[in-house]
């Protein structure tokens, strides 16, 4: 049996591993670490929960133990698709590198640029980042990638699924050609073959399990059901979920509930909290500080149920998760493997339930084709639903007809009365119409009385306008009178002075 001491790791790293309590490496670790220690590029494929993170953290720490980083020029780079996964990789580095003098920086969104700049300026050996935040620092001139010796892409297929292909290609081109590259993922889609061929130099392919396989320690169940009508589907789904959770009883120590949409994450969390469950929520639109607090509370068993989007489906290592509930059937088949991989980790037993409505059955076939076995069906629990919509009674139709007839009778006499008035006094009807149609000419303001009054100044003309105008050519006793105003003006001030 292979032990960590047989993998050629640094003694300080082995000391940290022993303190954690690990003695025997997992198959992916035993196969990938020797190649990484020899400087080869590695393409690692293994089902989730098999220890891929340690497969690249341990050899990186061993190789970086010698040397010193320069300011703004990190020596190694780890790219992760989500903030939570990047934070988890950082925790692994702190755990295994506690006896090595290595500096590390975590570059993720939702954290102040100033604090991250301070770490980069000091010089870091290990840089762990999400692609977007890494490029933000580079474009601000705070970071150089020309000193990268080892580069790791964790959950490579997820990176590409999330639209990071242009960012990944750009980051690769910013790093030196002589770097060592490590790719790790649970699934390897055919479309990323071009990326591996372009940026990996003769990689050592390490595949310890068939792609997209699920752990044998996980008991999977599919619960298919149908709501009485379409308007009650969401309510019935939440009720069935709560019923399954209650039926599991003490067997459920904690669990993760996955939803396809962020809005459903909030709705399901509120529903469970309303019925007395200890629950938290995590998805991409929430504040980063809140997300980390919820995740920390879930790891510490302060929160029993975690409702999440696929942001928590990749790479998160929470050893004690007993149950996974797929509230929605995953649209992408690979996501099913990653979701249920949150349970049954490190040889423990796990349970995975998936709820399925009729319109979601089309995705079930693709999932079963991927995992190469049918998912066992279970009987849907019996639930009672109250339709809050008011159902029409038998006498409602008669009442509606009666009200219609009353309205028609009440309108008829008014029409007849109007017709009689038109016959008796047709002239009286025409006259108001003519008066209404004829429009009076608009009178200017201040000219209601008519006449030649000043327009725009009202009835009053200020006295300074009526003063004599004297010029240099005139004699002192010459004067020009301005008598434009009406002699009958209301104000006597309109008379000119002598």
Image: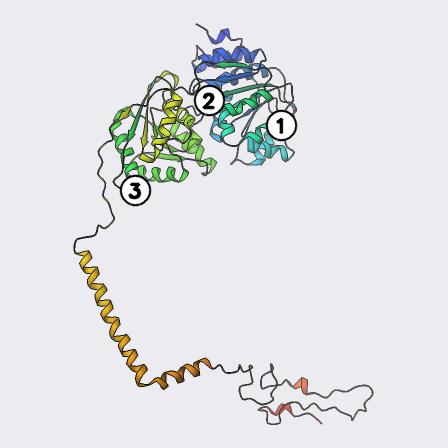
Is residue 91 visible in the rendered image? The answer is yes
Q: Are marks 3 and 2 in contact (CB under 8 Å)?
A: no
Is residue 303 visible in the rendered image? The answer is no
Does dot 1 land on a helix, a strand or a loop? helix
Q: Which residue is mark 3?
A: 230
- Residue 138 % position (x, y): 62, 32
How far apart marks 1 and 3 lie (CA) works out to 59 Å
Q: Counting residues from the N terminus, which is met first, the one under dot 2 or under dot 1?
A: 1
Q: Counting residues from the N terminus, which is met first, the one under dot 3 or under dot 2?
A: 2
Compared with 388, 114 (above or below) is above
Numbered marks: total: 3
- Taking depth in this image into account, of 465 and 415 the one nearest to the observer is 415
Q: Residue furthest left?
A: 395
The dot on residue 187 is 2
The dot on residue 100 is none
How far apart marks 3 and 2 lie (CA) works out to 36 Å
- Taking depth in this image into account, of 176 and 9 the one nearest to the observer is 176
User: What's the residue at 42%, 23% (across, down)?
Assistant: 317
Quadrant location of the N terminus?
top left
Q: Which residue is mark 1?
A: 122
Q: Nearer the viewer, mark 3 or mark 2?
A: 3
- Residue 420 % position (x, y): 28, 81
How far apart marks 2 and 1 lie (CA) works out to 37 Å
For label 3, the crowd category at 10 Å Cα-Cα, with few meaning under 14, some 14 to 19 and many 20 or more, is few
Which of the 4 quarters of the picture holds residue 295? Answer: top left
- Residue 340 % position (x, y): 37, 25
Which of the 4 quarters of the picture holds residue 38? Answer: top right
Q: Residue furthest front?
A: 423
- Residue 181 % position (x, y): 58, 19
User: What's the residue at 39%, 40% (across, down)?
Assistant: 263
């Amino acid at each position: 049996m292979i032990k960590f001491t047989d993998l050629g790791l640094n003694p300080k790293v082995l000391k940290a591993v022993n303190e954690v309590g690990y003695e025997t490496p997992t198959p992916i670790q035993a196969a990938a670490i020797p190649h990484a220690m020899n400087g080869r590029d590695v393409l690692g494929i293994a089902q989730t929960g098999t220890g891929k993170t340690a497969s690249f953290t341990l050899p990186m720490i061993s190789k970086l133990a010698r040397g010193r980083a320069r300011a703004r020029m990190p020596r190694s780079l780890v790219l992760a698709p989500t903030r939570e996964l990047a934070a988890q990789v950082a925790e692994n580095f702190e755990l295994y590198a506690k006896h090595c003098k290595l500096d590390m920086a975590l570059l993720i969104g939702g954290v102040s640029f100033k604090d991250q700049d301070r770490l980069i300026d000091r010089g870091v050996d290990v840089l762990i980042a999400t692609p977007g935040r890494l490029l933000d620092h580079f474009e601000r001139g705070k970071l150089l990638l020309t000193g990268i010796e080892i580069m790791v892409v964790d959950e490579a297929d997820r990176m590409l699924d999330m639209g990071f292909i242009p960012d990944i290609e750009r980051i690769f081109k910013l790093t030196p050609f002589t770097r060592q590259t490590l790719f790790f993922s649970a699934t390897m889609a055919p479309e990323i073959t071009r990326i591996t061929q372009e940026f990996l130099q003769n990689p050592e392919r390490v595949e310890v399990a068939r792609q997209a396989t699920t752990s044998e320690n996980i008991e999977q169940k599919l619960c298919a059901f149908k709501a009485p009508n379409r308007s009650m589907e969401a309510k019935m789904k939440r009720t069935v979920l709560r019923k399954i959770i209650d039926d599991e009883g003490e067997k459920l120590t904690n669990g993760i509930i996955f939803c396809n949409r962020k809005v459903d994450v909030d709705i399901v969390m509120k529903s469970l909290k309303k019925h007395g469950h200890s629950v938290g929520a995590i998805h991409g639109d929430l504040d980063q500080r809140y997300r980390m607090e919820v995740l920390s509370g879930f790891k510490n068993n302060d929160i029993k149920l975690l409702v999440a989007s696929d942001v928590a489906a990749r790479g998160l290592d929470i050893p004690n998760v007993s149950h996974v509930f797929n509230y929605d059937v995953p649209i992408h088949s690979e996501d099913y493997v990653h979701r249920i991989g949150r349970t049954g980790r490190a040889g423990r037993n796990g349970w995975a339930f998936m709820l399925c409505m009729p319109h979601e059955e089309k995705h079930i076939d693709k999932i079963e084709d991927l995992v190469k076995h049918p998912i066992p069906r279970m009987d849907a629990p019996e639930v009672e639903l109250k339709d809050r919509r008011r159902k029409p009674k038998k006498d409602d139709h008669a009442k509606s007809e009666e009200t219609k007839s009353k309205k028609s009778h009440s309108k008829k006499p008014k029409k007849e009365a109007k017709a009689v008035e038109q016959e008796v006094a047709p002239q009286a009807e025409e006259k108001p119409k003519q008066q209404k149609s004829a429009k009076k000419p608009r009178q200017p303001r201040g000219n209601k009385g008519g006449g030649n009054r000043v327009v725009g100044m009202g009835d009053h003309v200020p006295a300074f306008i009526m003063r004599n105008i004297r010029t240099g050519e005139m004699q002192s006793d010459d004067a020009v009178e301005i008598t434009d105003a009406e002699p009958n003006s209301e104000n006597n001030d309109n008379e000119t002075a002598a």
